Image: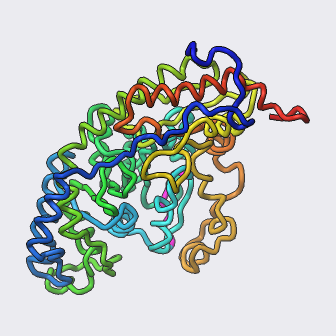
C-alpha cells in the first residue's frame, strides 16, 4: 500500500480531500494524419460514391474499398463489409443468417442491447444464456442448455475485449447446424488461441463508435470467410431489393435492403487509424497489467483473467468480494468515484468507473412485457415460451448486482502518474472502508 495514503484520511465522499481533482487526459485518436485524410476527401468533392442499384458503385467509392481491403488483411478475413455502425452490422449479419419469425437466437444478457435486438428486427426471439464468472463471456454449457428445435444462431459477444471460449461454442454450433455471429464491438485484435476473433465463427462485427479503440464517429465492419454471407450483407447494406434481379439472386430471404453505408470521409479516417490500432491496444494492455498488479494486493479485489485470449481491454473489469472486503461493492465503488475526476472529452459522461456493467437485458421492460414487437413474441409461427424471469441467469445477476466493476482509467495516453492516482484512490478507500458503514449498520 502506498506510503502516501497508509494512514487514515477522510474520504472525499464524506467531505475529505479527493485524491485527484485535475481531469485525466483525453483518449483522442484523431491526429494530423486523420485531418489530412479528411481534407483529401473534401478536396475531391466525393463524400460518398454508393449507388443503390447493381453496378460498380453498388460497392462504394475508393476509400470504402481501400478501408475494407486493409481491414481484411489485418484481421485475416476473406471479406470485409463496412457499415455505418456495429448495430447495423449485427442487423445485417442476422439477416444474412436467415433468421425470421419462429426462430431463436442465443445471446448473452450482459452486453449492449443491440446484440439481442438484432433478432427482434427480423421477427426472431432472443434467448439468453448465462455467462462465465471469470471471463464474463457466454458459458458454453449454458448455451447448450438453451438450444431448442427453434434455435437458428448463436450471438457470441467478446465482452470487454476478452475472447469467448470459441472451441466448445463452435463444436456446439456444428453439432446443431447453427450459425455463429461474433460481436467484436469491444474486441479489435483480440485473439483466441492465436486466432483472430471475428473470423472463427461465420461472421464477425466490429464497432467504430467514438469511444471504441479507434473510431470514425460512428461506423462498423463485418468480416466473414463465407462468400454467400458476404454477398447478402452487401445487399442488405445497400437497398437489396433494387439489385436482386440484375444480380441473379434466387434466395430472397431477408433481402429487404437498408442504408447501412459508410462514407468516404469515415473510411479515410478509419483507414488512417487502423495503422495505429496495434499501438493503442498494446498500450491499453500494458496499463491494465500495471493496474491489475497494484489492485491485486488489496484482498477481495480480483483482476480480470486472460484465458486463452489476448485481452484488448475495452474496459478493465474486476471482481469484488464483499465477504472479504467487509463492505458492499456499490458503497466501495461510489467512494472511489468520489476520489477521482472524469477525463477531458468525457466530462459530460461522468466518472470512468462504475459498479456492474449493464442491467441483464431480459429484465428490461421490452422482455418483461413481451411487447418488443408484435411479430416476435406473438407470432403464430413461434411455439416457444421464452423465460425472461429474474433468476434466469444467476451468474450474470450476481456479477451485475454484487461483484463486477469496470473502469476506463487505463486508456492511452494515461501516464504512470495518472495510473498511480487511480490506484491511490482504491488504496485510500480500502484503508478507510469501514467508514462507509452507515449508522444502521448496513453498508
Closer-to-camera residue (126/329): 329
Name the quadrant containing residue 279. top left
- Identify the image quadrant of the N terminus: top right
Position of 380 relative to 196 (above/below) = below
Residue 157 covered by magenta stretch: no
* In this rendering, position of residue 322 left or right of residue 251: right
Position of 245 relative to 290 (above/below) = below
Image location of residue 23, percent across then percent down: 48, 42
Closer-to-camera residue (275/370): 275
Asked whether residue 146 appears in the rendered view, the answer is no
- Identify the image quadrant of the C terminus: top right
Image location of residue 261, percent across then percent down: 26, 72
Position of 37 relative to 274 (above/below) = below
Q: What color scheme is it?
A: rainbow
Closer-to-camera residue (7/218): 7
Position of 156 relative to 438 (above/below) = below
Q: Residue at x 40, y 52 (%)?
A: 211
Query: What residue occupies the far right of the structure in this picture?
Result: 440
Asked whether residue 13 appears in the rendered view, the answer is yes
Name the quadrant containing residue 271. bottom left
Q: Residue at x 47, y 37 (%)?
A: 409
Image location of residue 112, percent across then percent down: 50, 56
Q: Residue at x 50, y 20 (%)?
A: 294
In the rendered structure, which segment of residues is drawn in magenta? 102-108
Image location of residue 308, percent across then percent down: 37, 29
Query: How many circles with numbers are drawn on the protein?
Result: 0
Q: Residue at x 27, y 47 (%)?
A: 199
Closer-to-camera residue (185/231): 185
Residue 104 covered by magenta stretch: yes
Amino acid at each position: 500500500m502506498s506510503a502516501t495514503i497508509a494512514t487514515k484520511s477522510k474520504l472525499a465522499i464524506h467531505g475529505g480531500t479527493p485524491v485527484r481533482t485535475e481531469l485525466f487526459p483525453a483518449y483522442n485518436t484523431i491526429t494530423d494524419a486523420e485531418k489530412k485524410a479528411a481534407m483529401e476527401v473534401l478536396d475531391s468533392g466525393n463524400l460518398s460514391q454508393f449507388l443503390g442499384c447493381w453496378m460498380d458503385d453498388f460497392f462504394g467509392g475508393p476509400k470504402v474499398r481501400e478501408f475494407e481491403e486493409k481491414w481484411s488483411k489485418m484481421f485475416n478475413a476473406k471479406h470485409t463489409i463496412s457499415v455505418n455502425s456495429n448495430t447495423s452490422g449485427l442487423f445485417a449479419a442476422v439477416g444474412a443468417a436467415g433468421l425470421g419469425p419462429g426462430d431463436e437466437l442465443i445471446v448473452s444478457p450482459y452486453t449492449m442491447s443491440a446484440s439481442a435486438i438484432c433478432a427482434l428486427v427480423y421477427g426472431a426471439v432472443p434467448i439468453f444464456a448465462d455467462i462465465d464468472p471469470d471471463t464474463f463471456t457466454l458459458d458454453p454449457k449454458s448455451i447448450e442448455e438453451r438450444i431448442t428445435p427453434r434455435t437458428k444462431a448463436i450471438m457470441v459477444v467478446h465482452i470487454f475485449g476478452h475472447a469467448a471460449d470459441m472451441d466448445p461454442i463452435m463444436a456446439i454450433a456444428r453439432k446443431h447446424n447453427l450459425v455463429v455471429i461474433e460481436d467484436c464491438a469491444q474486441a479489435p485484435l483480440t485473439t483466441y488461441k492465436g486466432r483472430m476473433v471475428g473470423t472463427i465463427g461465420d461472421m464477425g462485427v466490429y464497432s467504430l463508435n467514438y469511444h471504441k479503440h479507434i473510431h470514425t464517429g460512428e461506423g462498423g465492419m463485418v468480416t466473414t470467410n463465407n462468400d454467400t454471407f458476404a454477398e447478402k450483407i452487401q445487399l442488405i447494406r445497400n437497398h437489396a431489393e433494387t439489385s436482386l434481379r440484375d444480380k441473379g439472386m434466387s434466395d430472397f430471404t431477408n433481402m429487404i435492403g437498408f442504408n447501412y453505408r459508410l462514407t468516404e470521409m469515415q473510411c479515410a479516417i478509419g483507414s488512417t487509424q487502423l495503422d495505429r490500432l496495434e499501438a493503442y491496444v498494446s498500450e491499453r494492455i500494458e496499463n491494465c497489467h500495471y493496474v491489475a498488479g497494484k489492485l491485486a494486493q488489496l484482498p477481495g479485489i480480483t483482476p480480470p483473467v486472460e484465458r486463452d485470449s489476448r485481452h484488448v481491454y475495452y474496459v478493465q473489469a474486476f471482481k469484488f468480494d464483499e465477504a472479504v472486503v467487509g463492505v458492499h461493492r456499490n458503497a466501495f465503488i461510489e467512494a472511489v468515484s468520489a476520489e477521482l475526476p472524469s477525463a477531458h472529452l468525457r466530462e459530460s459522461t461522468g466518472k470512468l468507473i462504475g459498479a456492474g456493467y449493464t442491467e441483464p437485458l431480459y429484465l428490461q421492460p421490452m422482455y418483461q412485457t413481451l411487447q418488443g414487437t408484435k411479430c416476435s413474441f406473438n407470432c403464430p409461427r413461434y411455439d416457444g415460451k421464452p423465460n425472461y424471469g429474474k433468476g434466469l441467469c444467476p451468474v450474470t445477476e450476481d456479477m451485475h448486482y454484487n461483484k463486477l466493476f469496470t473502469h476506463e482509467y487505463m486508456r492511452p495516453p494515461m501516464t504512470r502518474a495518472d495510473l498511480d492516482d487511480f490506484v491511490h484512490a482504491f488504496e485510500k478507500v480500502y484503508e478507510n472502508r469501514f467508514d462507509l458503514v452507515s449508522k444502521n449498520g448496513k453498508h
